Amino acid sequence: MQSIQFQKVIDLSHIISPTIPLWPNDPPMTFDVVASKEKDGYYLRRFSIGEHSATHMNAPNSFHPNAIGIDAYEPASLVRPAVVIDIRHLTQDNPDYVIGIQDIEKWEQTHGHIDQGSVVLFYTGWQALWNDPKRFINEDEKGPHFPGVGAAATTFLLEERRIAGVGIDTHGADPGQDTVYATNSQILAKNGIVLECLTNLDQLPAKGTTLVIGVLRLKEGSGSPVSVMAFVP
């Protein structure tokens, strides 16, 4: 029998509303009232949202043809230990910062090696910009500008630390200027976990947290908005 020891539970998911930041050219998030208490005796809305909008998890088929969709993840694979690497001091003045192996090794000098099967969460400080969509996406004629995990760091984490995946508080695990999506591609090739647009990472310790990731089991979905609960010891 496995158990999760915790003192508190932190929700790492943003509230979903029509004003959330959206990836360029993604569909808008909408609510439509289809039943009202006055007319129908109950209240009901229909909602529409892109599979990679709000706090979300990407699926392998979003980058690899014939790979699994979001509905194929086993429930046990969505309960994972997590570590948090705080890189705010590196991103504050450099929105295009690429997280490298050196950032991981520096964290490990203090906290020890990252355990196999962990999800590595990167706290860039971008969560504070969520209510300002223009600054959150930070797009110009060259595309979005926000920090993300470099290809070399991802290779190191997968091959040397055998991680289960990564998460970040920006709109992409890959840096905004990365057009090949190397981090997503590498992790999802192994049916791993990629979480984007997380929040409340400032409330987590560097290590010891357990994540429980709730996906919408969209048939053959390329991803899903998610509820990510962090159980903090």
Image (cartoon, rainbow, N blue to C red):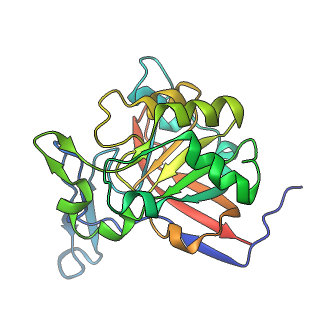
Position of residue 165 relative to residue 167, above or below, is above
Residue lying at the far right of the rendered structure: 1
Where in the figure is residue 77, as x and y percent of width and height? 67, 42
Q: Nearer the viewer, residue 176 or 92?
A: 92
Q: As drawn, is 113 to the left or to the right of 19?
A: right
Q: Could you tell me which residue is drawn at 40 percent across and 26 percent down?
A: 63
| Residue sitting nearer the eye, 210 or 126 | 126
User: In this rendering, does residue 179 appear at all?
Assistant: yes
Query: Can residue 198 be seen from the camera position used here?
Result: no
> Looking at the rendering, which quadrant does residue 40 occupy?
bottom left
Q: Is residue 82 above or below residue 27?
A: below
Farthest residue toward the top? 66
Quadrant in which the N terminus appears: bottom right
| Residue 152: x %, y % from top left | 52, 31
Q: What's the residue at 70%, 62% (across, down)?
A: 207
Compared to 85, does 6 lie above or below? below
Horizontal side of 185 relative to 25 (left or right) equals right
Q: Position of residue 31 (x, y in %)?
A: 21, 63
- State the residue at coordinates (51%, 27%): 186
Q: Is residue 196 left or right of residue 137?
A: right
At x 68%, y 47%, the residue is: 118
Q: Determine the residue located farthest toward the left in the rendered image.
A: 141
